[in-house]
Image: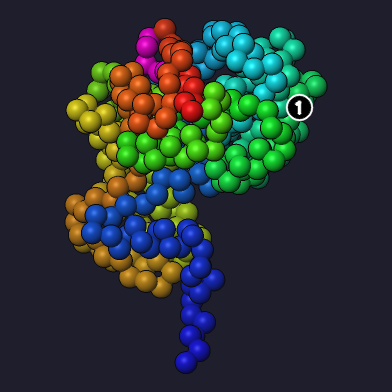
Amino acid sequence: MIPSIAVGSTHRHSAFYHDILDGLRAESKHLPSKYFYDETGDRLFQQIMNCPEYYPTRCEMEIMQEQSKDMARLFTAHSPAFNLVELGPGDATKSWFLLRELQRKHAAFTYYPIDISTNVISWLETKLPVTLPGIRLHGLNGEYLEKMQQVKSFSPNPKIVLFMGANIGNMTVPRAIQFCRQLHDHMQPGDLLLIGFDLKKHPRTILDAYNDRQGITRAFNLNLLTRINRELDADFNTDLFEHYPTYDPGTGACKSYLISLADQTVHVAGKAVSFRENEAVHMEISQKYSLEETANLAAQSGFQPVHTFLDSKKWFADVLWQRLP
Ligand code: AVJ
């Protein structure tokens, strides 16, 4: 029998299709937050970063504005010539301060931003040479680890890897350990890694950051349902799901859920998915760390902490690690 070419067949093999349906069919329903970032999601995230309640971006920006000089000093002392690899640079507004300091010091480095979005890479390749004339820049479009491997074939120089913006928070702690071990395996002994962590602080401050009064974070979560409707021929009614952010100060896990407000059946690419009233769909984790916990993560993944850069409120840390042999 030849399988019939049914409605939705164009989606059948996409990773998006499989990830969404697997998540919705699981015992505890979940949707991967990496899919938040379509065009609308990118715009909503920009708006979140401007919300009064969403502090992490401003804290890390302060670190980069105030301490890039110290960072650049540590980097150039480490190696006269190096490859500066940035994972998920966004518009590089934060790393820009570091790049400028490195240029001022006439450091011999090539900047390799790695991003899954072609837009991000082409934007950086057009814009950065304007404000940072003479920058040696080689954008790479694709998966982090795969592209890191490729950097080695371009240049044998030591690597300094940046993974900022608390993006590591979107992994559970076990996943973060696994990811840092993979980074370790893609680096050489002595190479440096700078990771941004959102730190534990008053639980109310954290919860408010994911529950802004303007409802932008709510829209950010619901937008994934709209994206699924558009790209997978689904029929979610976003009015029947409620944004429910949580923060557990014990574990440091900040999790967002969508709660079904009714017994309902939704169709995704022709497949029926049922929700009970009050059933939760886990959307995103933004894990918070203490400084001790970041040091434990380093120890468990083959790195030695070298330096900690904190903002004035001590709400955010960019930690510098060195890869052990
Ligand atoms: C981009 C992953 C750091 O988890 O704080 C912001 C994304 N989600 N508000 C975060 C996000 C809801 C953000 N990161």
Beta carbon at label 1 within 8 Å of ligand 1: no
Q: Nearer the viewer, residue 43 or 162?
A: 162
Taking depth in this image into account, of 103 and 177 the one nearest to the observer is 177
Task: Provide residue 299's location: percent of width, then percent of height.
Answer: 36, 26
- Residue designated by label 1: 136
- Residue 89 vertical position relative to residue 60 in the rendered view, above or below: below
Q: Is residue 56 left or right of residue 186?
A: left
Residue bounds of the magenta highlight: 313-318
Residue 301 image position (x, y, % from top left): 40, 32
Location of residue 40 with respect to 316 vertically, above or below: below
Task: Specify the amino acid type for callout 1.
Answer: Arg
Q: Residue at x 40, y 53 (%)?
A: 225
Q: Is residue 275 toward the left or the right of residue 127 in the image?
A: left
Q: Looking at the image, can residue 317 be seen?
A: yes
Figure check: 31 above or below 176: below
Taking depth in this image into account, of 75 and 63 the one nearest to the observer is 75
- Is residue 71 part of the magenta span, yes or no? no
Query: Which quarter of the figure has residue 144?
Result: top right
Residue 136 place in picture, x, y as percent:
76, 27
Circle count: 1
Q: Residues within 10 Å of mark 1 (few under 14, many from 20)?
A: some
Residue positioned 51% across, 63% down in the render:
14
Report whether 204 appears left or right of 49: left
Residue at the extreme front of the image, as rendered:
325
Q: Quadrant of residue 310?
A: top left
246 and 73: which is toward the camera: 73
Residue found at x 66% / y 37%: 152
SS of the residue under disc 1: loop
Residue 315 forms part of the magenta stretch: yes
* Image position of 179 with respect to 15: above or below: above
Q: Residue furthest bottom?
A: 1
Whether residue 72 appears in this view of the structure is no
